[in-house]
Amino acid sequence: MTAIAAPRAPRGAAASLAGDRLRGGPWRGWLGQAAGVVGLLLAWEVLVRIFAIPTTILPAPSLIGRQLVELRASILSAAFYTMSSAVVGYLAALVVGVLLAIIFAHSATLRRGIFPFFVASQAIPVIAFSAVVILWLGNGLMSKIAIAFYLSFFPITVSAVKGLQSADPMLVALLRTFGAGSWQVLWKVRLPIMTPFVFVALRVATTTALVGAIVGEWFGDNNGLGTLILQSLHTEDTVRLWAGIVACAATGTLFYCAVAAAERRLLWWPAAALDS
Amino acid sequence: MPDKLTLERVSKTFDTEGQRLPVLLPVDLRVPEGEFLTIVGPSGCGKSTLFNVITGLLPPDPGGSVAIDGRVMASTLGRIGYMPQRDLLLPWRSVVDNATVGLEVQGVPRAEARRRARAVLKQFGLEGFEDFYPFALSGGMKQRVALMRTFLFESDIMLLDEPFGALDALTRSVLQEWLSAVCAKYRRTILFITHDVEEAIFLGDRVFVMTARPGRLKLELKVTLERPRSPAIVTAPEFVALKRQILDAIRDESLRAMAGEQPPAGP
């Protein structure tokens, strides 16, 4: 018997095989990133002071930082508001996108019949319709959810269709010889193989969902980060405006990192890492 | 011994852009219960097409039939344990959970399926590896997991399509001996495809030689070598004689194929 001393495969084994981890340990990467951010902020601060750039053009990071601390309660609640519509729209996009993909992958007729319209619909700048969406769904959470959903479900659907179709035909044939019907093949083979493909789109969609929520607020709302930015613009409060921008960036980064963490947790086997 | 599997005039023709391409000429085959039948032939001789028809993945041409226990089947899907050349393990499932895929499809509850898998781990040389994932296994071990999956699937007939084709010679020889022992114990009816003439003789109760393009059964040989067979048997005079006979048949066929002649129709 070829009982080689193979390592036991823990969850997360794939992540530990990643190259950067082998080279310097995970903390070294973090340290580099932190140093980069600190360096950038320092350069910004110094340049603003040396050239005496007016606050209306570009406030110093120290000023923005102070503003963030002062307004932390209202900024946090605004971020929470914007994030909730973005996340709900995003999750709806995931569910609808995968369901649509299952239908498309299952029926070539539907795929050929509907998919072209589907693609064409994405060529329309959806943002232009945002005003109408506000009229239809009101200026509450619902309209932002709808816009965030619309902006993110298309790439998810396309990747999911690709993922469902990329199952090894031999593997599907094997399952069929066991007597499996299409639902069993879908559940046991196609959906797991689809997951890495969907995550590629999910990472991109964090941005589009957030953009949808923020832009939606510009067209009508009195809450959220988009509103905070727009109000600051109207009152020419540049520091508050920049605090809003920083909050948006932080929210987006957090969203992205959460999805990336979920991906690492769900897709721990090495082949999955290769696909993404 | 009653026939476990009966093929009557099973042929397969593919239609490609209006052209009819015969891949498999009519085959008649009776496999008694418990027999280990090996099929040997060159690439492209329609061996895999034959297996696809037997498993039910492809329907035979009209007029041909596949019967199990004497009953002609509309479809044999779900009735025959099939093992393709590649292991096709699911990378997100552990050894045990890969081995139970067939049972799960058959509706055996997960816990019961796992219990059955654990019970045969030792037999398949996978004891202690039950919670490993495929990426941590060697090629030979993956192949044994795939075999275990085929064995656990509840069916009396197993089709093995070059299961050791991708393995190195040493691993292959060890697994051949092991498979021979496991099969003697379980007494399943087995059809085994291979390129390797020695493998065909070593494992088989009967060897079929197939010809290429279109495929047909050319030669049938009984292997009366005693079991259990040890690897040393390959130098026994009877073994060598069988090998000579099969190699000659394949050589004739290859030469004819290279000369571009059409082989005579029908077996």
Image: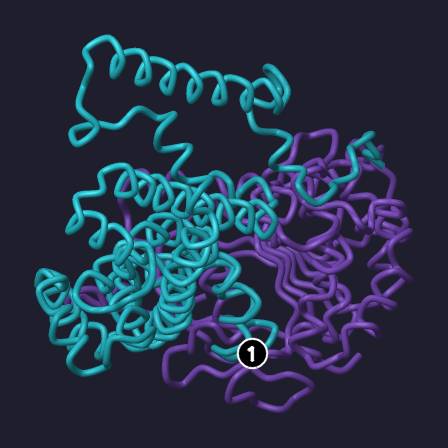
Give the camera-side residue of B123 and B163. B123
Looking at the image, residue A164 lies above or below residue A233: below
Provide residue B206's location: percent of width, then percent of height: 70, 58
In the rendered view of the protein, which quadrant contains the N terminus of chain B?
bottom right
Provide residue A193's location: percent of width, then percent of height: 49, 56
User: How many marks do you count on the picture?
Assistant: 1
Label 1 lies in what chain?
Answer: B
In the rendered view of the protein, which quadrant contains the C terminus of chain B?
bottom left
Rendered hue of chain A is cyan
Provide residue B51's location: percent of width, then percent of height: 53, 65
Residue depicted at 61% across the width and 54% down the height: B90
Is A226 situated left or right of B214 in this image?
left
Provide residue B237's location: percent of width, then percent of height: 79, 36
| Residue A249 visible in the shown view | yes
Chain letter corresponding to the colour purple: B
Is B207 situated left or right of A78 in this image?
right
| Residue B39 visible in the shown view | no
Is A203 situated left or right of B35 in this image?
left
Residue depicted at 65% across the width and 76% down the height: B105
**Which residue type carries mark 1?**
Leu
Give the camera-side residue of A254 and B96. A254
Looking at the image, residue B210 lies above or below residue B133: below
Give the camera-side residue of B15 and B199. B15
Q: Which quadrant of the structure image shows residue A122?
A: bottom left
| Other-residue count near label 1 (Cα within 10 Å), few / some / many at <14 / 14–19 / ≥20 | many
Instruction: For mark 1, give the secondary structure.
Output: loop
Give the camera-side residue of A276 and A41. A41
Residue under numbered circle 1: B77
Looking at the image, residue B263 lies above or below residue B153: above
Residue depicted at 23% across the width and 81% down the height: A137
Instruction: Indicate how the structure is coloured in the image.
Output: by chain
